[in-house]
Image: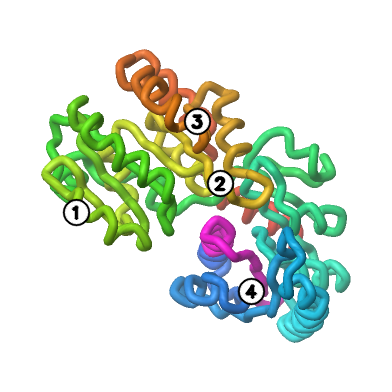
Amino acid sequence: MGNYKFILSGGGTGGHIYPAIAIANELKRRHPDAEFLFVGAKDRMEMEKVPQAGYKIEGLWITGIQRKLTLKNLLFPIKLISSLMKANSIVSKFKPHAVIGTGGFASGPLLKMATVKGIPCVLQEQNSFAGITNKLLKDKVEKICVAYDGMERFFPKDKIVKTGNPVRSDLVELKATKDEAFKYFELNADKKTLLILGGSLGARRINELVADHLAYFEATGLQIIWQCGKGYYETYKSHQSENIKVHAFLNSMDKAYVASDFIISRAGAGAVSELCLVGKPTFFIPSPVVAEDHQTMNALSLVGHEAAIMIREKELESKFKTEFESVFKSAEKQQELSKNIKSLALPNATADICDEIEKLIQ
């Protein structure tokens, strides 16, 4: 058999793009001669991130259905037909041995056309509550790689493989030392450190919470690494001090994780999978505005294992301080959370997903 060819499709958010890139990197490591093509949605962030990772990408003219009647919804059928035609032509020309979908609008038309042509397809579902595109494709694909238990609520049981979510390779083995991490952030190695993560764009409500509690955190002797997001950096950079380090974006996540003792984070699937590997006491504040409220579902699945604390945005005023102190003041509770969240980590996810893909093409 000649060189393998793979099409990967997923996008709209980093949560769908990074897993696809991680899977491509692992397949490339195993099959250096393989050819890869990504398919994304025009004018979404994959059109920039995928070429940066060194892969070719084609864009489809597709968006999701808006939840209210808008002009965009009237265009939806036209966009869908155009995307199906383009997907059909991409698959016919490229002739992949397998197609991998990681969720997001563009993967719908592409995997639909690939299954019609009898090409083996694998879905990777990052969340504990399945996305709409993956639910529509479930009967036609060969395998569905998931990160949570109980996914037979959404998918045929015999197709599910629990692999976990691909995470950035530098996080699987946190190589940075504590000394390097504290030096990098110019922090005091003798103090406890709180890491704030709002995702790449930042999280307005988390930033407001931190700004309101800075005096409280400092009074408890904590120092802070605060990733506030690009859009919020101008607003919050004036809080920078000896104990408070404000960053738009963290380029060295491994060092941030090594330096931290406590973490406050959104509950996107990628973040949750990373934080299981990191194994520090974590407070999740899910974004209430994502599709199907899946961040809340992701966080709740950890809370069920007593592996994290979840506080909803609307309860921050009433609950944050009490919840934070219950962990901050108890070494026992910290150890329990660390041990439980670590036990949920699936560090071999990328390799396991690629094993499933290889089984289908051999």
* Mark 1 neighbour density, 10 Å: few (under 14) some (14–19) many (20 or more): few
* Mark 3 neighbour density, 10 Å: few (under 14) some (14–19) many (20 or more): few
Residue type for callout 3: Glu
At a point 42% along the width and 50% down the height, the residue shown is: 204
- Pointer 4 or 1: first along the chain: 4
Q: Nearer the viewer, residue 95 or 362?
A: 95
* Mark 4 neighbour density, 10 Å: few (under 14) some (14–19) many (20 or more): many
* Residue 114 placement (x, y as % from top left): 80, 71
* Mark 2 neighbour density, 10 Å: few (under 14) some (14–19) many (20 or more): many
Q: Could you say whether the residue bearing mark 2 is in a helix, strand or loop?
A: helix
Q: Which mark is residue 310?
A: none
Residue type for callout 4: Ala
Q: Which residue is mark 3?
A: 315
At a point 77% along the width and 77% down the height, the residue shown is: 75
Q: Nearer the viewer, residue 64 or 339?
A: 64
**Above or below: residue 53 compared with residue 151:** below
Q: Which residue is mark 4?
A: 41
Residue type for callout 2: Ala
Is 93 situated left or right of 13 in this image?
right
Q: Which residue is mark 2?
A: 269
Q: Magenta region: which residues?
A: 1-23
